[in-house]
Amino acid sequence: MSGARVLACQAFPTHPAQGPPRPAGHDHRMATRRTLLATTLGAGLLPTISMRSRAGALYDEYAEEYDGLESGRAAQLLGLAGLRGRLASMARGDVLEIGAGTGLNLPWLLARPLASYTALDLSGAMLAGARARLARAPPPPFPVRFVAGDAARLPFPAHSFDCVLSSYALCAMDRTDAALSEALRVLRPGGRLLLLEHARSELWPLNWYQDRTARAVAALSKGCRWDREVGALVRAAGGEVWALERHLLGTVVLLEAEPRA
């Protein structure tokens, strides 16, 4: 995300001054597109999951238009697809993805020699998109399952996975601490937590700007907070951070961690 998301809201008038009659549902669809574009213009990103049930319904509504914005030209120019590939390249064994959305990470994950893959999201419509993406791909040599659920209350026993990963989802969660604790709980000893997330930059005055616009940006982007110290959150939840790379002036981080012994 960037300040462009906030400014973008003024770029699209709510009602055109004139034009031909509009089909039923036009205003609703255009409002959806305007909201999504306003929150993705800066970085081509949209959070996939929120901890509240209303967020599941919200992303159900946006599911059909999500891919075109999330994987659009802006995201490609900023190198965000490459970062998704980097994230997936570290996955191994039995993998759980939280906030899996429409399965944008699937092309890379299906190419990995995994033991199994589980996709979890709060939105049933998003998961339907992920299932459709899987159906269009060659059959993977490992089992794949899709689970509608809350990242803050994972429906899995402790030590169920070798890897838990997430991309651009934690930033939109109300209970990030609970989601991270749950992710670490379901990891086996020696397992890896892999995150690709929005984060507070280390650079001033960018971090100053993030701090002062965080609430406004969250209001425009369905709760996404771009001012969080991701590494500190992981440590507070009981994780040991092994590696943390900063990208896009530090506003995106690629992090690898494991449960603290």
Image (cartoon, helix red, strand yellow):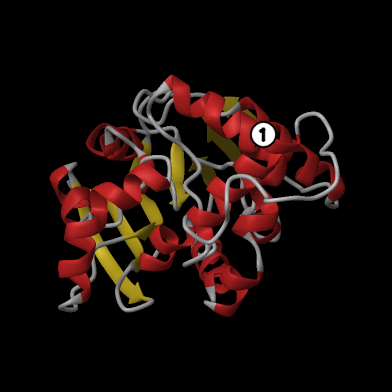
One can see residue 214 in this view: yes
Taking 211 as reference, is 123 above or below it? above
Q: In which quarter of the image is residue 27?
A: top right
Report the quarter where the N terminus lies.
bottom left
The residue under the point 50% across, 51% down is: 46
Query: Label 1 amino acid?
Result: His
Q: Where is residue 214 in the image (x, y as percent from the top left)?
A: 25, 53
Q: Where is residue 222 in the image (x, y as percent from the top left)?
A: 42, 40
User: Residue 216: x, y in percent?
Assistant: 29, 49
The x and y percentages for residue 219 are 35, 43
Q: Residues within 10 Å of mark 1 (few under 14, many from 20)?
A: few
Residue at image coords 49%, 24%: 149
Image-based side of 251 in relation to 135, left or right: left
- Quick one: 127 or 243, which is closer to the camera? 127
Observer-nearest of 156 and 105: 105
> Outermost residue toward the front?
18
User: In which quarter of the view is residue 6 placed?
Assistant: bottom left
- The residue at which mark 1 appears reads as 28
Q: Which residue is drawn at 72% across and 40% down?
A: 64
Taking the image as shown, residue 36 lies to the left or right of residue 253, namely right
Q: Say left or right for 56 vs 26.
A: left
- Observer-nearest of 229 and 241: 229
Residue located at (32% from left, 68% from top): 251
